Image (tube, rainbow, N blue to C red):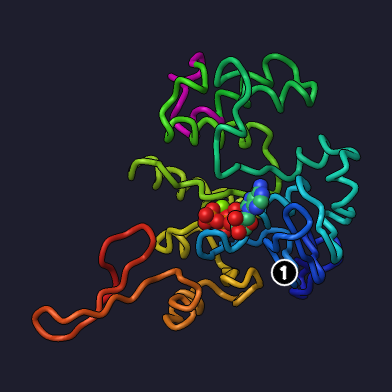
Amino acid sequence: MSEAGTMNATDLIFQLRAVQYLYAGRHVALDSIDLDIRRGEQVALLGANGSGKSTLLKLLDGIYAPSSGTMQVLGRDIAAVAAGEDAFRFHREVGLVFQDPDIQLFSATVLDDVAFGPLQLGMSPSEVKTCCDEALGEMEINHLADRAPFELSGGEKKRAAIASVLSLHPDVILLDEPTASLDPRTKWVLVNLIRRLGEAGKTIITATHELEIVPIIANRVIVIGEERCILADGPAEAILQDRALLIKANLIHEHLHGHGGDHTHTYTSTSGPAVR
Ligand SMILES: Nc1ncnc2c1ncn2[C@@H]1O[C@H](COP(=O)(O)OP(=O)(O)OP(=O)(O)O)[C@@H](O)[C@H]1O
Ligand SMILES: [Mg+2]
């Protein structure tokens, strides 16, 4: 941001206009998406199962090209990136942690996966080692370095997948349900890491069902509705206080029943009874 508080063109990382994505040419996964995301923003992407969060992150990462509409990322037409043009350089700047870590981990050992990006960049062996030690340390999995990814538990795989993206130090980090299947301590280690990376100026977009982490990891929230369009986009505090919106988007569930007098319990997707 400039001193006057206005953004210049280079601050615009993602620009989507009337973007639609269809699977198999007919199944609408996202529709009418207009979106600007600027450098240094921390965004939480919320929506019910099947609303299109993972699809949007794959579009932002240049894995998919829009079926219609236009999309620029870092000033480049994303369709060219999706077609493979200069894709490695792009992925040095924009890293995606997939919802399913099995997609991310393809090497014989965790260390090989974490070292893959730095090696591709042509770093020296000592630089590669430093990047890998740091990334494994951030996820507290140095002890898993020599293990085969397919032998790991679900949470360990998730941590290895996150480390394999962190080792490249991308400026833009896309995280698809990064805390899913993590134990409580590891979850808060990761939440704190996301907060620190945000404070350090990274642009971070996190799809999550865990509303309790949203105020810590994001200052902006985008809600995708079950119609696969953006239902709301605004400051995190305002959106998280809008119960009608959260219920409409199926992000909290209000269950009315009558034991001991009528009252309601509100459930989030990840907690038991919460709020009130
Ligand atoms: N490979 C695929 N082929 C066909 N349809 C798909 C494919 N992947 C996702 N879809 C469909 O696209 C829609 C959006 O899916 P997406 O995975 O983006 O949702 P999501 O918001 O990430 O859901 P979740 O919270 O369950 O992860 C869903 O209707 C889903 O069934
Ligand atoms: Mg998903």
Q: Image quadrant of ligand 1?
A: bottom right
Q: Position of residue 29 (x, y in %)?
A: 67, 61
Query: Quick check: can you spot residue 54?
Result: no
On screen, residue 127 versus residue 185, left or right, reads: right
Dot 1 beta carbon under 8 Å from ligand 1: no
Q: Quadrant of the C terminus?
A: bottom left
Residue 270 on image: x %, y %:
36, 57
Please indicate whether residue 18 sits to the left or right of residue 107 in the image: right
Q: Secondary structure at mark 1?
A: strand
Against 150, residue 237 (above or below) is: below
Residue 256, given in percent of the width and then of the height, sits at: 26, 80
Q: Outermost residue toward the bottom?
A: 262
Residue 233, quarter of picture? bottom right
Q: What is the span of residues highlighted in magenta in the rendered image? A: 135-147
Q: Which residue is pictured at 54% across the width and 62% down the height?
A: 218
Q: Which residue is mark 1?
A: 31
Identified at 75% across, 59% down, the residue is: 22
Residue drawn at (51%, 18%), measured in percent from left and top? Answer: 145
Residue 158 spot, x, y in % from top left: 49, 36
- The N terminus, quarter of image: bottom right
Q: Residue at x 70, y 50 (%)?
A: 58
Residue 214 placement, left or right of 109: left
